[in-house]
Amino acid sequence: DAKTTQPNSMESNEEEPVHLPCNHSTISGTDYIHWYRQLPSQGPEYVIHGLTSNVNNRMASLAIAEDRKSSTLILHRATLRDAAVYYCILRDEGPGTYKYIFGTGTRLKVLA
Amino acid sequence: DAGVTQSPTHLIKTRGQQVTLRCSPKSGHDTVSWYQQALGQGPQFIFQYYEEEERQRGNFPDRFSGHQFPNYSSELNVNALLLGDSALYLCASSLAAGFRLRVSYEQYFGPGTRLTVT
């Protein structure tokens, strides 16, 4: 299974941008990079995903390195509600379907 | 539009007992995945069901089994419970069409069932 590596924790001030890094040196050519976040006492929720090009949506931006061995989730203006564990995940291809391999994630603390 | 629902919310069982957890996928979704999340850890993939068959399985013993019904809902069964089975069990639903179309659809997770084994 392809693996991802993330820092255990990060801190950010409210209203400032946050860059959450992820290393995935064993990524294959067809692996999509997914980001999910898990707020306290909730199930994970989808944030963003991409394959090769940088991606933007209403929640965040995803910057993917040219060699695809790393990516960065960008929260443009952190709010207190963004405090969560952020997971960088590679989608693992199997017989007829996919599965998602979670790592330990990055715990983001947002300071008021 | 109802999201993913799971029942029960909490459950307390004794070692050696058996437990059944239930999941209803998001409307329109046909694939259900189950995850185990121990305290302080990321979710660990247990297995995935599509077309009422187990399609993929993570590194979990045969004590963990599942089922998918024609309406796409799913059950997770755990036999001979161990203390180490205490965890949050998450269900996620998605669309299998993503595989055939070579695109990626997100998974939607339920709130989970907290299982405590004493």
Image (spheres, coloured by chain):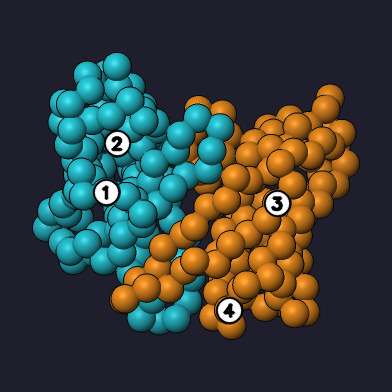
Chain colours: A orange, B cyan
Dot 1 or dot 2, earlier in sequence: 2
Q: Which dot marks residue A28?
A: 4
Q: Which dot marks residue A6?
A: 3
Q: Looking at the picture, how far across and down is residue A104, in whole percent? A: 60, 45
Say which of A76 and A66 sits in front: A66
Residue kind at label 1, given as amino acid type: Pro
Residue kind at label 3, given as amino acid type: Gln
Report the chain holding disc 3: A
The crowd level at tag 1 (other Cα within 10 Å; few <14, some 14-19, many 20+) is few
Q: Is residue A87 above or below residue A9?
A: below
Q: CA distance from mark 1 to mark 3?
A: 28 Å
Q: Looking at the picture, how far across and down is residue B52, in whole percent? A: 15, 61
Report the chain holding disc 1: B
Q: Name the residue at 18% across, 33% down.
A: B80
**Can residue B98 be spotted in the picture?**
no
Dot 4 or dot 3, earlier in sequence: 3
